[in-house]
Amino acid sequence: MTKVLTDARSIRIKGRSFLAVVLSPDMPLDHWLARLDDLAARSAGFFLDRPVVLDVSDLQIDKVVLKELLEQLAERNVRIMGVEGARPSMLGPGMPPAMKGGKAASDFEVPEKPVVEPEAEATEVEASEAEVGDARSNLPVVAEVRPVTQSLVISEPVRSGQSVMFPEGDVTIVGSVSSGAEVIAGGSVHIYGALRGRVMAGSLGNASARIFCRKLEAELVAIDGIYKMAEDMDPELRGQAVQLWLENDVIMAETLN
Amino acid sequence: MGKVIVVTSGKGGVGKTTSTAALGAALAQRGDKVVVVDFDVGLRNLDLVMGAERRVVYDLVNVIQGDAKLPQALIRDKRLENLFLLPASQTRDKDALTAEGVERVMGDLKKYFDWIICDSPAGIERGATLAMRHADMAVVVTNPEVSSVRDSDRIIGLLDSKTLKAENGERMEKHLLLTRYDVNRAERGDMLKVDDVLEILSIPLLGIIPESMDVLRASNIGAPVTLADAKSLPAQAYFDASRRLAGEALPVTIPGEKRGIFGKFFGRKAA
Ligand SMILES: Nc1ncnc2c1ncn2[C@@H]1O[C@H](COP(=O)(O)OP(=O)(O)O)[C@@H](O)[C@H]1O
Ligand SMILES: [Mg+2]
């Protein structure tokens, strides 16, 4: 038998950025957990299948408390992929790795391959196909990060079970967002149709992002992490054309026109 | 080449099997050559509704696994010589269906039939996605209530992403069949309104089938309602729907409402 040649191919190691949800608990932790339970109860499955990073920068806790917090989260099916802002003594074997250097998408470096700006129309089509998440697995597709503010236009309804994620900028939907569908944008979200599902604008920390829709029947709206559920909304606004924005960490709303 | 239609809904018990049989028979009553295919492996029903349960020898799984030839598995209807049934297996589990096998069978059926109507199982799992995978056109069966509408919305999303048509960048033609429409409940206002359902799903309306004892009576004698009692209201509604499927522009009326002409909805562009 001839000697098997050593495989000349090297192991490929690539870098890739993913969008994770960051949870920043505050003290007392049991109160914070109660609020988390409240959010989860009203917005079931929010953390399922989503990468979540725990930011403990502002917490004065030790390893024992952190371990307990991680267990509490695991019990709620929130799986933490990494811990940000932890002192080395707080982490150990069996705990998620330390993460650092997280940045908002606008801080991302220019991707290594030169971006040839395609015609506006081509961008739309390409983007809308890539962004409408795989409806069966519910795994959102994260767009390639580009240096300039981007916009994504989707010219069909976002159906129940679909997830549109666009951390780079604004999302415009020419159609409705169904109950059970969600749109997560780094910038503002414009919906030329009924909003019946969930929308999160300014999701990477942009308090000036807004949400516009032609008919408000949302299950949840959030701007820069501040959220409002259907039952917290003014019933007068239901079914109206509405814009929502953030003022001093409070979601404001008014009818359009 | 025949046209493959999937009758689908997400939710169970909304009337997929009833509608597959009724539309299949109605198209055959026009003289077209039709096969209705049961994809509900393990929970087959179509054979009962077609009144062919005692004549099943081979089934779809046997054909896919090569244990039987397609003509051996096809059951000709006793009343209409141009109507056939390809039954599902009651004993195998749904993993017995393979994508390649289904593709081969669909390809063969298209050569012989004008219409291949696939009765999808409920849910969004393998059985349902295989049933829709090779379709040219979808009939989305929905009841006028919230959970059914949401499940249909979910299914429409899958029709636009998980089918061969969608993967090839083509548009799947989708039609809404509103079934079990209860005239009395509509009058009392405890059902979703037709316009609301259409607004949420935004696909063109193929027809509205009234809730009726005639449907139960038909399935008890093992006949599609269009054959059991062609004069009945649900049969009439299915006949009209089958004409629209075949391309006729026929205005849709809401059962129990004489004035309700919904032509504008059918004329809408497919979403
Ligand atoms: N228009 C109707 N009026 C009354 N009963 C109906 C009607 N359509 C369906 N049904 C009944 O509802 C039940 C479920 O129908 P079926 O066609 O088996 O639904 P699916 O295939 O979607 O599960 C059956 O008992 C059927 O007879
Ligand atoms: Mg059925």
Image: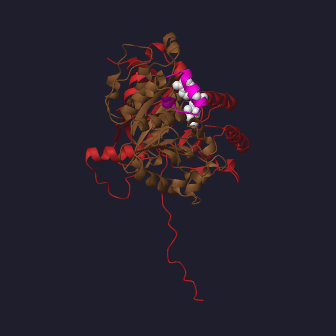
Chain colours: A red, B brown
The quadrant in which the N terminus of chain A is found is bottom right
Can I make out residue A40 in this image? yes
Q: Residue B67 occupies which quadrant of the picture?
A: bottom right
Is residue A111 found left or right of B19 in the rendered image?
A: left
* Residue B11 visible (yes or no): no
Closest to the observer, A152 or B265: B265
Q: Residue at x 60, y 37 (%)?
A: B48
Q: Is residue A196 above or below residue B37?
A: above
Which segment is the magenta one? B210-227
The relative height of residue A204 versus residue A87 in the rendered view (above or below) is above
Q: Say whether residue B103 is magenta.
A: no
Place of residue B223 in the rendered image (x, y in percent of width and height, measured from the top left): 55, 33
Residue sitting at x 38%, y 58%: A112
Q: Residue furthest top?
A: B188
Question: Which residue is at the far left?
Answer: A119
Q: Could you say where residue A227 lies in the image, as x and y percent from the top left?
A: 52, 27
**Image spot of residue B215 (x, y percent):** 55, 26
The quarter of the picture where the C terminus of chain A appears is top left
Q: Nearer the viewer, residue B83 or A171?
A: B83
Q: Is residue A199 left or right of residue B124?
A: left
For residue B225: magenta?
Answer: yes
Q: Position of residue A174 (x, y in %)?
A: 34, 32
Q: Ligand 2 is located in which of the four quadrants?
A: top right
